């Protein structure tokens, strides 16, 4: 199983691994299509796998298998495609429906609580690849988490295409806060619950209170922000303004000063001027963004943004580089402030681990994988606390 792209793909790949346990000489590529570069990497991975495993049956699923279906199906290396919406259905793979429990492939459990998206951002093709928003019920989510908790996993990460839209399609339209509260109640001994990327305008009052005051909910807010200028946000068809993001972070930090903020930001969106780019840079400073996912804009066929006036490619790359440098500066200052502070770190397999606010910390070689250990860093080397 090869997973490309987002945390949701990681979570879904674990479930597919469980369904396909015992299937010999089968390689599945769970693809990504969020950018043109992601599709290129999918093609590259397909060719690399075929060279390495010439006799294997190679199947492709994921967003690229929907959006680029004809092109991928025409590749001689590909034996078949599995519809993205059906990839977690055993019937799509012609296997028995009673799959074994998902194996623990990571020290953290990624739980896909929601899939699809009902929004229409002008730059995005993901709704075409994943369909409308669909939520797991609370009972389904609790059942999946229980498997990992029984195996001693210390951190659960809730993922989805648009996680904060969870519940809109369920009876009573519960907000994501209701799901988080149910998880905390059902698993009182679960040390850590972390959110993946959130849409700030969809954070319901209960979720806000839990982010602000519940110590088992990690102090790590990653926003699906996309830009720092209101006109660009409007042209993207986002539902928030810059001031909404600023106010949200201010309110949360007022309650929880140790909050670390991350964000997705797009560089060089069509019609972006130097002034608009400056606003994108400045919101990194205003929000104190220390976990940045920077995407140079690339037009996706069939999207409204493809038809808008484009920014020169060299300028897009230069602006993306400036955004990354600004985030790196914020991150370095933030990490330096962690020195001398005791941190509870979840040990990964590579002799590092993550603190509650998602700072990466080096650990002694004999630290058990999956253990929560207290570390007081004394220095910062190459972006990692030591």
Image: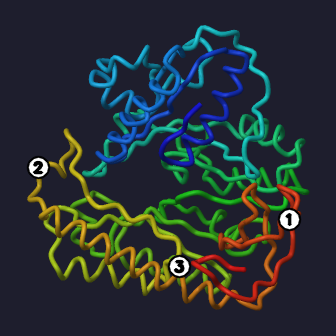
Q: Is residue 207 above or below residue 322?
A: above
| Residue at 48%, 20% in the rendered image | 59
Q: In which quarter of the image is the N terminus?
A: top right
62 or 197, which is in the foreground?
A: 62
Q: Do the residues labelled 3 and 1 touch (CB within 8 Å)?
A: no
Give the alpha-carbon distance from disc 3 to disc 1, as whole Å. Answer: 28 Å
Task: Look at mark 2 in the image and give the residue it sits on.
Answer: 307
| Residue at 86%, 75% in the rendered image | 374
Q: What is the secondary structure assignment of the residue under circle 3? A: helix
Q: Residue 249 carries which label?
A: 3
Q: In which quarter of the image is the C terminus?
A: bottom right
Q: Residue 372 carries which label?
A: 1
Residue found at the far left of this picture: 309
| Residue at 21%, 61% in the rendered image | 235
Q: Is residue 197 above or below residue 252?
A: above
Q: In which quarter of the image is residue 24?
A: top right
Give the alpha-carbon distance from disc 2 to disc 1, as whole Å. Answer: 50 Å
Residue 128 location (% of width, % of height): 34, 34
In this figure, which colouring scheme has been used for the structure? Answer: rainbow
Q: Quadrant of residue 240?
A: bottom left
Give the alpha-carbon distance from disc 2 to disc 3, as whole Å. Answer: 34 Å
| Residue at 84%, 54% in the rendered image | 185
**Within-10-Å neighbours for mark 1: few <14, some 14–19, many 20+:** many
**Within-10-Å neighbours for mark 2: few <14, some 14–19, many 20+:** few
């Amino acid at each position: 199983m090869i997973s490309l792209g987002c945390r949701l793909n990681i979570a879904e790949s674990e479930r597919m691994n469980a369904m396909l346990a015992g299937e010999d000489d089968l390689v599945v590529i769970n693809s990504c299509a969020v950018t043109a570069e992601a599709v290129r990497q999918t093609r590259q991975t397909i060719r690399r796998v075929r060279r390495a495993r010439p006799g294997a049956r190679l199947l492709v699923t994921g967003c690229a298998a929907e959006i680029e279906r004809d092109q991928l199906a025409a590749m001689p290396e590909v034996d078949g495609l599995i519809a993205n919406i059906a990839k977690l259905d055993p019937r799509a793979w012609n296997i028995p429906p009673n799959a074994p429990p998902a194996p623990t492939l990571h020290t953290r459990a990624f739980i896909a609580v929601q899939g699809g998206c009902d929004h229409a951002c002008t730059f995005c093709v993901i709704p075409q690849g994943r369909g409308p928003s669909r939520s797991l019920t609370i009972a389904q989510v609790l059942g999946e988490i229980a498997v990992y908790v029984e195996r001693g996993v210390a951190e659960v990460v809730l993922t989805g295409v648009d996680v904060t839209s969870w519940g809109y399609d369920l009876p009573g339209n519960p907000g994501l806060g209701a799901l988080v509260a149910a998880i905390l109640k059902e698993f009182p001994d679960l040390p850590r619950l972390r959110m993946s990327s959130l849409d700030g305008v969809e954070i319901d009052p209960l979720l806000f209170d839990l982010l602000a005051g519940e110590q088992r909910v990690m102090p790590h807010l990653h926003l699906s922000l996309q830009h720092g200028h209101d006109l660009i946000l409007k042209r993207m068809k986002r539902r928030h303004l810059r001031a909404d993001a600023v106010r949200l972070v201010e309110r949360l930090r007022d309650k929880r000063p140790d909050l670390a903020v991350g964000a997705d930001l797009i560089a060089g969106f069509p019609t972006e001027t130097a002034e608009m780019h400056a606003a994108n840079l400045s919101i990194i400073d205003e929000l104190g963004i220390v976990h940045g996912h920077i995407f140079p804009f690339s037009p996706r066929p069939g999207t409204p943004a493809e038809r808008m006036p484009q920014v020169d490619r060299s300028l897009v790359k230069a602006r993306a580089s400036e955004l990354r440098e600004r985030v790196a500066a914020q991150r370095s200052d933030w990490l330096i402030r962690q020195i001398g502070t005791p941190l509870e770190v979840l040990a990964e397999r590579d002799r590092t681990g993550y603190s509650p606010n998602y700072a990466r910390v080096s650990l002694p070689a004999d630290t058990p994988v999956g253990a929560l250990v207290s570390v007081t860093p004394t220095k910062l080397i190459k972006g990692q606390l030591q």
